[in-house]
Structure formats: C-alpha cells, structure tokens
Amino acid sequence: MKIGILISGRGSNMMAIAEAAKVGLIENCEISVVISDKADALGLKKAKNIGLKTVVIERNGRKREVHDAEIITELKKYSVDFICLAGYMRLLSAEFVLAFQNQIINIHPSLLPSFPGLDAQQQAFEYGVHLTGCTVHFVDEQLDHGAIISQKSVSIKADDTLQTLSEKILHEEHKLYVETLNKLSTKKFEINGRKITFK
Ligand code: GRF
C-alpha cells in the first residue's frame, strides 16, 4: 500500500503513521511522499529527519483549484493508494476529491458529526459533553463530512483541562489512524454510501 501524506503543521499523526509503517504495524505500507502547503511546517523537518521524501506546494494566493491541481499532479507520480490528511488545514476542491474517490482520508479530533471545523477539542470541552474522541473518515468536498471509517471515544473528566483533554485525544488519534490504515491495507472492506463495512 502506497500512501501520500498531506500536512500543514507539527506532523505528529504523520510521524505515528511513519513509525508504525516502519515496524510493520501497518502491513506493507510505504510512504511515497509527504506534501506540505507550508514551507515552515514542523512536520516537514521531522519527515526529512527520518528520510521521507518531502515536497512543499504552497498556495501563494492561487485559486484553490490551481493549487490542488499541482498537488494532484505530484501525487499521481507515485500511484498512491491512499492520501492521508494529517493536520492539513485546507478544504479540498471537488476536482481533488474526484481525482481520488474513496482514497482520501482525514483524522478529526472529535466524534463527528459533533464539533466539525477548527478547535474541535475546545468546542467539546466548552459544550460540556462527557464523551468526545476522534474520527477517521473519507474526505468529500464538505468540511469534516465524508463517510466515517472509524472512531474512538475519550471521556472528559471533571479534572480535565483543555490541554489534558487535547493530549488524550491526540494519543488516541495516533493509535486510531494506524489501526485504520492497517485495516484499509487489507482492502477487505465495502463502501455503500456512508457505510463502510470491514470483512
Ligand atoms: C490533529 O488533531 C488532527 O486531528 C487535526 O489536526 C491535528 C494535526 O496534528 N486534523 P498533527 O499535525 O498530526 O500533530
């Protein structure tokens, strides 16, 4: 399974995937390329340090479609099976989604459909829910909206702060992304509308 990873920031999920792939926790997984839309993303340094191929494709004020077209061209070079968004802070164009149908995956730090968008941990914390978590889902043109592949819950305790909660969720994100990719690597799943079934 060849994957491309898109990042914009610190890249902890990217590193979790890379480390898991290296030790075989994701079967037959090769990270073909890590693409960042930010030249100063911390994750880029981390990826380089462990010998991954990195490419920077900044938006530079271009239209979303034009920026995305350059990313699509780069990804097509590697014939990737899946594209993992890992803290990639841009909404994808319809063209991007169409070019890789059911191949683009994202991780979001809440139990979708609750708390989509930015600062999901803070949204959950302030709302006062007792359970939140993280979601791995396929990507469509709408924000944090595509079919849900897997979820993990995290409880919010009375003594949690936003920081402790965010740390707990991130810890689960790293495990969930790896487990989910490992399941997808078997290719033994069916997609019917919004429902994903693993065999
Ligand atoms: C994670 O919380 C992820 O769920 C969200 O953005 C954050 C990225 O963190 N989409 P990192 O760059 O993987 O450390």
Image (tube, rainbow, N blue to C red):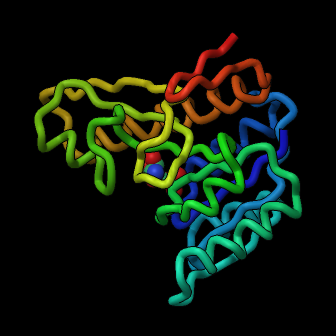
Q: Position of residue 185 (x, y in %)?
A: 77, 29
Q: Position of residue 36 (x, y in %)?
A: 63, 69
- Residue at 87% of width from left, 33% of height from top? 28
Q: In the orientation shown, which residue stands out farthest toward the bottom?
A: 61
Q: How many marks?
A: 0
Residue nearest the viewer, comparing 177 with 112: 112
Residue nearest the viewer, comparing 9 with 89: 89
Q: Position of residue 49 (x, y in %)?
A: 75, 63
- The quarter of the picture where the N terminus appears is top right
Q: Is residue 97 above or below residue 20?
A: below
Q: In the orientation shown, which residue stands out farthest toward the top?
A: 199
- Residue at 79% of width from left, 22% of height from top? 186
- The quarter of the picture where the C terminus appears is top right
- Residue at 57% of width from left, 47% of height from top? 13
Q: Position of residue 126 (x, y in %)?
A: 12, 44
- Residue at 65% of width from left, 54% of height from top? 98
Tell me if 124 is positioned left or right of 118 in this view.
Answer: left
Residue nearest the viewer, comparing 140 with 173: 140
Tell me if 174 is positioned left or right of 44 in this view.
Answer: left
The quarter of the picture where residue 166 lies is top left
